[in-house]
Image (cartoon, rainbow, N blue to C red):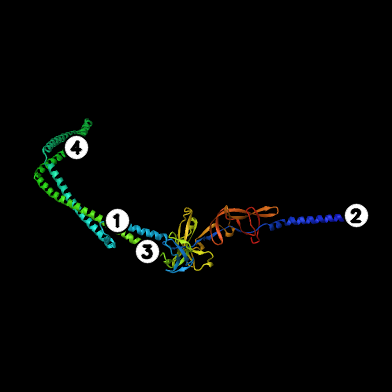
Amino acid sequence: MEEKKKSRREWVKTAAIVFLTILLILTFFSNTIMNYSLPEVAAQYVQSGTITAKIRGGGVVESGDPYEVTVKQTRTVASVAVKDGDTVQKGDVLLLLEDEESDELEAAQLALESAQDAYDLALLSADVTAEAVNGSYSNTSVSTYRQRITDAQTAVKAAQNEVDELQESYDELEAEITLVTSSIADIDDEEEALEKAQTDKENADFALTAAKNKLDTITSLYEYANDVSSGDLASLAIQKNEATQTYISAQTAANEAQLAYDMAKTAYDNKVAAEDKTGDIASLKHEQDKVKVNLDEKSRELEEKQQELSDLTADINKTLNLEALYKSIENAREEYDELLAEAVDAVVTANISGTVTTVNAVAGKEVSAAEPVVVLQPEGKGYTMSFSVTNEQAKRLSVGDVADVVNAWRYDDLEIVLSSIKPDTSDPGQSKLLTFDISGEVTAGQTINVSVGQKSATYDCIVPNSAIREDNNGKFVLTVESKSSPLGNRYVATRADVQVIASDDTQSAVSGGLSGYEFVITTSNKPVEAGELVRLSNDN
């Protein structure tokens, strides 16, 4: 019994030792065990440095100068002889059309009939026979009509100039007769005005002389008093000032009287001279009568010339209208005949050599002039491709920059050059549209991705491209932050929102939530979320 109790105690003791041992092991190795369950990440410090920025984008290749092949009338396609990518030469058959009368042919026939009716109607109201018009429409006849009108207009202008010159002479004689007639009127008024002006002048001169004498006398007294220091000096100074003002007023009045006298004398002399011209009036009127006869004759000639021009213009307009109507018949007939000839055994051929980029025709379906049936890339013409970038990116580019093709091994001998940088119409304030000229082995409709730009710049925060992540809230990186715990350091993934401002094939310059000393996660063996614990790989 004692042995059983002893054996049980030994077992309990052993179990306790084992348990405590296991507990101790788990305690010491719990950090390692937990670490193995955490995502393993590789991280790298944020650096400063230089990036040679490459702007990347892609677009659909388009024809640089597409040539559209169209039909003149709605027709049903019998068969299509080409497909996208085919190379054709000028004159090669593109489509075969079924024999049928189109709507355009019917419209051309109606237009021809309408043109004929309009011509016949105009012919009935004109004094010109059909034989005189048919076939006479030519540049020669039009030039002849124009010359006749020009000659008539020149004759009218010459007659008008003669009338204007005679009218001017007549008006000048009339003005001279009026002047002479008025100048020989009664001379009494001018004589009376002259006598009054003479009297006013003499009075003004007398007043001026008196004022001058008084001023001289007072000036002499003032100078004497000043020399002997007389007590009357102040009174004499006042008198001298008053005499000076009186003299100035008298001088002004004398000048005005002299001017009035001169004017009255001139008027009087003109009247006297005019009396000698009385005999000239008869001569002037006789000359004016002769001018009036010529003026009336030239005025009648002018009216005749104007009427001739008006009649000539009316006749020519009538004739030209008939010729124009006849020409419209010829044009309508030519259009009708051309469409009629294409109604049977019609084909659509290539007008140029090139490559077929688009075929919009299907056998058994109708085609019309509303859209091209085939689009050709002309031989020797290049292709274009466009995509949009930000204004900041566009500042780092220049027209003429050569772009590199992404996955260049898929293409042969492609040369892609930036040809224009223009505002993007979909977002003109924020974006620019880059257009590239493409030459080489390429066809319209292909999608090509390129990188362009070779300008270097230095940045404070540069991270590997693999560190940049993106979700609905934008781009960000995960940094590793160390936190102390009783069992050692723990590492937590922390989100930092960033904006990418430049990048090359391996790294990107960023701004935003980084200061420049962070440890950013580049790769991990499983997905990592912000706030999660992570373990660092042995490479860090």
Place residue 471 in its image quadrant. bottom right
Where is mark 3, residue-wise?
Answer: 337
Name the secondary structure under disc 2.
helix
Report if the CB atoms under discs 2 and 4 are less than 8 Å apart.
no
Question: Pointer 4: what residue?
Answer: 252
Q: Estimate the spatial distance between the alpha carbons at disc 4 and disc 3, rounded to whole Å.
A: 102 Å
Dot 4: few (<14), some (14–19), or many (≥20) neighbours within 10 Å? Answer: few
Which quadrant of the view contains residue 320? bottom left
The label nearer to you, 4 versus 1, is 1
Residue receiving disc 1: 122
| N-term mark: 1 or 2 | 2
Alpha carbon distance from label 3 to label 2: 134 Å
Mark found first going from the N terminus, 4 or 1: 1
SS at mark 3 in the image: helix
First in residue order: circle 3 vs circle 2: 2
Type of the residue with mark 4: Thr
Which of 186 and 233 lies nearest the eye of the viewer? 186
- Is residue 33 visible in the rendered image? The answer is yes
Residue 180 in the image: state x and y as whole percent: 12, 44
Could you tell me if the residues under marks 4 and 3 are in contact, i.e. CB atoms within 8 Å? no
Q: Earlier in the sequence, mark 1 or mark 3?
A: 1
Q: Which mark is residue 2?
A: 2
SS at badge 1: helix
**Amino acid at dot 3:** Asp
Separation of marks 4 and 1 at Cα, in angstroms:
88 Å
Whole-angstrom CA distance, mark 1 to mark 3, is: 25 Å
